[in-house]
Amino acid sequence: MATERLDLTPEVLFGAAAPAAPARRRRGTGWLFASAGLVVVVAAVLVAHALAPGPAQPPATLTAFSVPQRTTDVLDPDDASRLVVQPGTTRLLVRTPDGNHYAALSVSGDLCLLRVPDGDVPSEVCVHDRVGADITIGGNGDGGGGQVRLVADGAPAPSAAEGWRPAGPNVWLRG
């Protein structure tokens, strides 16, 4: 018995269309996707590094914090309610014509410099509590004429050439 070979494919027999040839990729498309992926990975690493907490730094050292809170260090309850500081941490640093100035720690642990003027709303400026912290309040921007600067141990002393004069341990005045 002789067998003839038929060159009929299943597509011809069943009427199915031949599959389309795969689309041709443009040159460089693979490199484009690889480069974009690399950029995303590098950006993710940089963001993760920026958001990662650094090594813990020791807190600021102030002479005022080395002694227990006295009666003169305690804020009036109305003034304390307007500020975000821990009431037990306030220490009177200096009295000026612009008000009483205190060092304190905020509820989140930042180091704060407070200005409490007589008969007016108190203000505060806070920075991360660390060795070398330096905070200034008053003068430009908040309506007060003079400036008070709190300089924690480890920070450079303010320049006398810029008008700063010492007003006690860690405290300087200008204006």
Image (cartoon, helix red, strand yellow):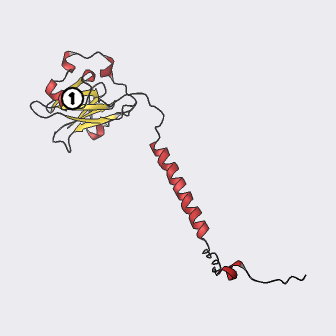
Picture coordinates of residue 136 (x, y %)?
Answer: 27, 37
Q: Which of 42 and 19 is in front in this view?
A: 19
Q: Which residue occupies the foreground of this view, 172 or 93?
A: 93
x and y percent of residue 78 in the render? 14, 27
Residue 98: x %, y % from top left:
15, 33
Residue farthest to the left? 119
Q: Which residue is at 48% across, 34% downward? A: 55
Q: Circle 1: is it few (<14), some (14-19), or many (20+) Cα within 10 Å?
A: many
Q: Name the residue under label 1.
A: 101
The residue under the point 26% across, 21% down is 88
| Image quadrant in which you'd find residue 21 | bottom right
Residue at the (15%, 42%) spot, across then down: 143
**Position of residue 104 in the picture relative to residue 29 (left or right):** left
Q: Where is residue 11 in the image (x, y as percent from the top left)?
A: 68, 79
Quadrant in which the C terminus appears: top left
For this view, does 129 lie left or right of residue 103?
right
Residue occupying the point 57% across, 67% down = 32
Q: Where, by quadrant of the figure, is residue 120 drawn?
A: top left
Please tell me whether mark 1 sits on a helix, a strand or a loop.
Answer: strand
